[in-house]
Image: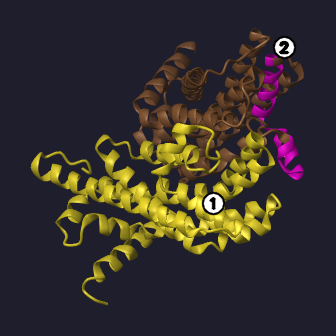
Chain colours: A yellow, B brown
Amino acid sequence: MSDLLFPYAEAARAGLRDHLVANPYRLTLTTTWPRAVLQGLFFTLLGGVAYGPAGEDFAFVGTAGLILVLSTVAGISEVPGTDKAMGTTYRLRLGRPPALAVVAARSLPWLLEGLVTTVVGVALIGLVTGRAGTAVAVVTAVPVLVVTAVSSCALGLAGAALSAARDAEILAANALTYLILAAGGVLVPAGRIGWLDAVGEVLPVTHGLRALRAWVDGGAWLPELAAEALVGLGWWLVAWAAYRRAAAAARREDKDAFA
Amino acid sequence: MTEVLLAGAGQQMKVFLSAWRFTVVLGVVQPAVLVLVTLAGRPDDPVGTTRTATAVVLTGIWSTTVWAGAGVLRRERVEGTLAATLISVRDPRLVVVGKSIGSSLLSTALVLVTVGAVLAALRRPVTVEHPAAFALALAAALLSAVALGVALSCLFVLTRHAIHVSSALMYPVLLLGGMLIPLPAVPAALRPLSWPVSLRWANDVLRAAVAGSPDLRALGLVLLLSAGYAAGGALAFRAVDRLVRRKGTLDLV
């Protein structure tokens, strides 16, 4: 393996080991997956209660995005949080690879977990609610799911970095997840609450879900997927800037948000 | 006894407030979003709005019970005070009950304020035909939350994965509680499982109070189930006590 890739491969391997220690398969089977399925089922049914049968169909596809962000926005905040708790952030900063790149590599298990949990959740909810056909269409939308997962990881890491100084990573992760629920087109169709729609345009998952619905309906999904990728790129830049700012503040002002 | 309960309640409220980030998620963010996404699709109808609001309040009560109230003993262990609590002069059960009361009271108040603020911002009026019955129903729901909090708190100290269990427990009750999701919308095979969920009956009592016709049967069921939860909590506490004193197999720190 080239010298360039080796540090990231090692970071990914370390991240996977950390992830498996904190989230053994027994927990995944008995709590993570059931929670995702039940939460998805809850919001699918809520979509029907609030917006009628069409609302339930809408929310069913939307829960793919919701289940995804449980890992890629909420869960992923554990990764930089672990360095903060262990007091090892300075090691990331002293290393050659950029800190965000190492953290991103270590976050790969969360991205994979998000994708797998989404597939499992959508499949089971589809079976329970009589939407097996739609479920198959959703889980086979691999490019859409992967791009949405990557863009939402950026939001998760950016949120963790920006809230670290106030020890508010849990608040940020959960607040962002609920914001996506409210503004990301998960449950609420566009055009109901104007200001929420505007917020949703700059959040990951919003365009990803539009692409997903277009994929399911056999329509043009690529433009919305491109928009999702662009939004994700924006959030990666925010995460990068937040990490650089935290490192600069630690060096010059002795204010380490990750200490 | 009152002194211990009040001290425990007061201390737990301070803990709740000091962990403000967590408190904000459960008491502000979640109820605000649920009210928004649910009412966005509904016409401006005071009765429907009130039913949605009460459902969100009950949802908030359950969320804070399963995350905060159920974590009372776990927090004691993290802070290194579990052993002192268990061997203190005062009955440790009173300490746990007092803390559960404090947690449930403060979280319910916060959720009520949040829901009220969102409704005011959305200019959605509410209507309650029988306010006294409504207040009684809310008190019964609180009592149930306290009993549940105590029972879960004892159970959660017996496992190392309490956070994951809390996470997994939340949505079954939200699905079966008949609060935001009416029971007819739940798959038929699952509906009988709603019977032992006290919040389902608390929701019925609150809806009846909104309509002006108190539902004493449902109120009785809330109280009966709360007594059942309290009995379960007593058994779970005896298990904790046995593991600590006789077997010495429970981690106290």
> How dense is the environment of label 1, judged by Cα within 10 Å: few (below 14), some, or many (20 and up)?
many
Q: Nearer the viewer, residue A178 or A56?
A: A56
Secondary structure under tag 2 reads loop
User: Is B250 on the left-hand or right-hand side of B195?
Assistant: left
**Residue type at mark 1?**
Ala
Evaluate if marks 2 and 1 touch, with contact meaning CB atoms under 8 Å apart: no
Residue B126 horizontal/vertical position (percent): 70, 18
Which residue is disc 2 drawn over?
Answer: B212
Is A108 situated above or below B220?
below
Q: Nearer the viewer, residue B139 or B232?
A: B139
Q: Are marks 2 and 1 on the same chain?
A: no
Residue B41 horizontal/vertical position (percent): 70, 37
User: Is B198 on the left-hand or right-hand side of A255?
Assistant: right
Q: Give the Cα distance between marks 2 and 1.
A: 41 Å
**Residue type at mark 2?**
Gly
* Quarter of the figure that contains the N terminus of chain B: top right
Q: Nearer the viewer, residue B185 or B176?
A: B185
Q: Chain of mark 2?
A: B
What is the span of residues highlighted in magenta in the rendered image? B184-210
Q: Kindly give the residue lying farthest to the bottom in the view shown.
A: A1
Which residue is disc 1 drawn over?
Answer: A64
Residue B251 horizontal/vertical position (percent): 49, 49
